[in-house]
Image (cartoon, helix red, strand yellow):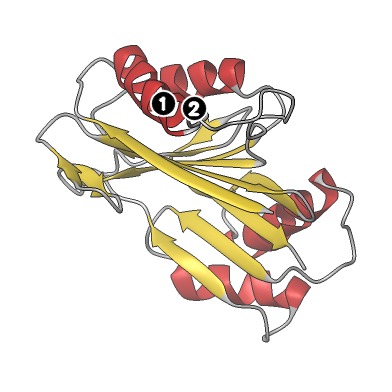
Amino acid sequence: MVTIASASSLDRDPRTAVRDCLSQLEAGAAPDPGHDPDKATDPDPDLVMIQVNAALDVDIIRECLRDRYPSAALHGATSCQGTMTDKRLCSAPDAGMAIWTFHDGEGDTGTGLRDYNGDPGEAAAQAILDAMASVDRFGEIPQLVWVSAAPGDEEAIIAGIQSVVGRGVPIVGGSVADNTVSGGWQVFDRDSTTAAGLVVSAWFSP
């Protein structure tokens, strides 16, 4: 069974913004009055995607979410003045973040991050290999690839991913941003943050 949920916050403090989002997610997962207490509640997500105003400290956000979801993959990216969810536009000059969670009881979702190191195409190829290996799906073909990347090398990044998974796998996502288009963008996963690289997620689902 696939479970997804989203939450957002306009708080300017990154820790408070994360707490706001987690409270919304937990409230949404609360059992209804007819819930059978002997049945398990929704499990923690396989993947947590984060879109955040570049004015917020992404390392604090990453650490808070890693503490809350110790087994989930994290896929994070900065944006220009906020983000949009299924519920609202969450935007302000120096605030705005959203979280989207995904759980698939029959599949896997892996994430990989790489710095460009002068070769965005090779970085993209290695990132998707990392994502596949992180869920023991090395050598298999994912159903979908999501990419968030520092701008300027989009064609090379797509070519790098396709060199691993072929041309038949949908690649979605886009370039990250900041509020002044001045190079203050960042991407991150569970373990690291970079301003000159990309993070990719690979979906394996029946």
- Residue 191 can be seen in this image: yes
Where does the C terminus fall, quadrant-wise? bottom right
CB within 8 Å, label 1 to label 2: yes
Identified at 58% across, 29% down, the residue is: 192
Left or right position of 7 against 153? left
Disc 2, SS: loop
The x, y position of residue 94, in whole percent, is 14, 29
Front residue (pair 128, 48): 48
Identified at 74% across, 25% down, the residue is: 38
Quadrant position of residue 144:
bottom right
Front residue (pair 192, 10): 10
Disc 1, SS: helix
Residue type at mark 2? Answer: Ala
**Residue marked by disc 1:** 27
Whole-number angstrom distance, CA of label 1 to CA of label 2 = 5 Å
Where does the N terminus fall, quadrant-wise? bottom right
**Residue marked by disc 2:** 30
Local crowd size for mark 1, using a 10 Å CA cut-off: few (<14), some (14–19), many (≥20): few
